């Protein structure tokens, strides 16, 4: 379901300010499926997921629980 993380300037700002990481996901993926995959792959707890479709791509903004840091995931993925 997850394709790749977004590394735009706005996405990086969201990582630092809102503890939110953005991924491009499969268009057919539901929020529940995205949440399960993030929690399983990165061993974190998801607080909220917002999705949008832009340029025929589905983007998921995933806000993590306060106990976990989005910047840690970004570092593992090589975004930071």
Image (spheres, grey):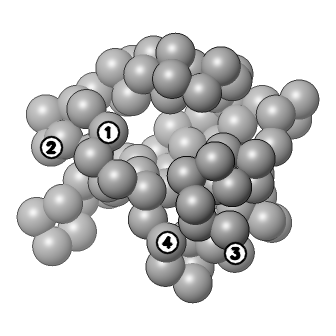
- Tell me if mark 1 has few (under 14), some (14-19) or many (20+) residues whose alpha carbon lies within 10 angstroms of its own: some
Q: Are marks 2 and 4 in contact (CB under 8 Å)?
A: no
Quarter-wise, where is residue 74 in the image?
bottom right
For the residue labelled by badge 3, is the local secondary structure a helix, a strand or a loop? helix
* Residue drawn at (43%, 56%) of the image: 5
Which callout, 2 or 4, points at the residue further toward the start of the chain? 4
Circle 4 SS class: loop
Vertical arrangement, residue 34 with respect to residue 26, above or below: above
State how far apart marks 3 and 4 are (Cα): 10 Å
Residue picked out by circle 1: 2
State which tag comes first along the sequence, 3 or 4.
Answer: 4
Residue hosting label 2: 27
Counting from the top left corner in percent of width and height, residue 31 is at 37, 28
Mark toward the start of the polypeptide (1 vs 2): 1
Q: Which mark is residue 7?
A: 4
Q: Tag 2's secondary structure?
A: loop
Left/right placement of residue 54 relative to residue 36 reads: left
Which mark is first along the chain, 3 or 2? 3
Occupied quadrant, residue 18: bottom right
Residue positioned 82% across, 34% down in the render: 68
């Amino acid at each position: 379901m997850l394709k790749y993380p977004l590394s735009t300037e706005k996405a990086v700002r969201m990582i630092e300010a809102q503890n939110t990481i953005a991924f491009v996901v499969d268009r057919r993926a539901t929020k529940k499926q995205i949440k399960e995959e993030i929690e399983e792959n990165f061993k974190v707890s998801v607080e909220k997921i917002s999705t949008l479709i832009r340029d025929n791509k589905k983007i998921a903004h995933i806000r993590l629980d306060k106990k976990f840091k989005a910047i840690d995931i970004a570092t593992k993925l090589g975004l930071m």
